[in-house]
């Protein structure tokens, strides 16, 4: 295929695959161990969402947290993790991400073992008797500022009822009817006609 160029590179100490670099680290005089660290492609410009954009603040925090969490999971050593974080922040500070948000996120990710917490919750849920497992009680309302406040108040009121003690209360939202919903369909209902 004339438009595709394939380059074969053979190296004995390091190899890259997707966003991971696997490299040999000396373990003893005769042995090496394999370690991993983040690999940034030469063309990677870290074009993440601007911190000063009008997206909700939790979106900005979530982007930074997801990147740093990925760095922690891939990096074998703290030095590799720290270097990847520094390289990322060198770009993000010019995109409106504050230093305090960066530091707090790194500290949070380093101090939490997310995999262990997930496994612990799974084991606890599996060991519960069927009658001990909480059933979900969704409180469904429309999504607008007034309805959100009503839903929160309703949840607080229901949580005080004795019949709600064995249930997990969650707020769920739906959007109001609008013109787009009337005109655009995500699936066919069999009533549309074809025109020749």
Image (tube, helix red, strand yellow):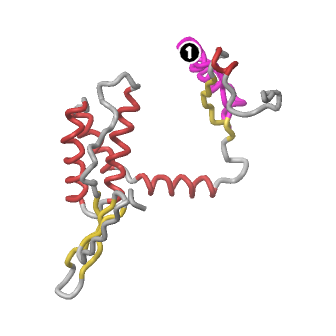
Q: Position of residue 62 (x, y in %)?
A: 39, 37
For the residue labelled by badge 1, is the local secondary structure a helix, a strand or a loop? loop
At x 78%, y 27%, the residue is 195
Per the image, the residue denoted by label 1 is 144
Q: Position of residue 43 (x, y in %)?
A: 27, 49
In the rendered view, tell whether residue 117 sits above or below residue 141.
Answer: below
Specify whether residue 45 is painted magenta. Answer: no
* Residue found at the very far top of the displayed protein: 146
Q: Nearer the viewer, residue 14 or 56?
A: 14
At x 21%, y 79%, the residue is 27
> Quadrant where the C terminus lies?
top right
> Quadrant where the N terminus lies?
bottom left
Give the residues drawn in magenta, as a range.
137-166
At x 68%, y 32%, the residue is 186
The residue carrying pointer 1 sits among few (fewer than 14), some (14 to 19) or many (20 or more) residues within 10 Å by Cα, namely few
Q: How many marks?
A: 1
In the rendered view, tell whether residue 50 sits above or below residue 45.
Answer: above
Q: 23 left or right of 150?
A: left
Task: State the predominant SS element of the stretch in magenta.
Answer: helix
Q: 116 left or right of 98?
A: right
Q: 193 left or right of 60?
A: right
């Amino acid at each position: 295929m004339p438009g595709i160029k394939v380059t074969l590179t053979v190296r004995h100490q390091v190899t890259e695959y997707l966003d991971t670099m696997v490299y040999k680290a000396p373990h003893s005089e005769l042995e090496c161990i394999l370690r991993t660290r983040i690999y940034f492609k030469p063309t990677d410009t870290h074009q993440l969402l601007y911190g000063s954009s009008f997206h909700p603040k939790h979106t900005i925090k979530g982007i930074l947290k997801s990147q740093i969490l990925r760095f922690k999971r891939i990096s074998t050593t703290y030095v590799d993790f720290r270097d990847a974080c520094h390289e990322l922040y060198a770009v993000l500070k010019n995109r409106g991400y504050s230093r305090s948000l960066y530091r707090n996120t790194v500290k949070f990710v380093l101090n939490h073992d997310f995999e262990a917490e997930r496994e612990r919750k799974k084991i606890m849920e599996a060991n519960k008797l069927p009658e001990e497992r909480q059933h979900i009680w969704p409180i469904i309302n429309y999504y607008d500022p007034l309805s959100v406040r009503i839903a929160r108040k309703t949840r607080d009121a229901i949580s005080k009822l004795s019949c709600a003690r064995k249930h997990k209360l969650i707020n769920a939202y739906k959007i109001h009817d609008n013109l787009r919903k009337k005109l655009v369909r995500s699936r066919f209902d069999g009533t549309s006609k074809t025109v020749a």
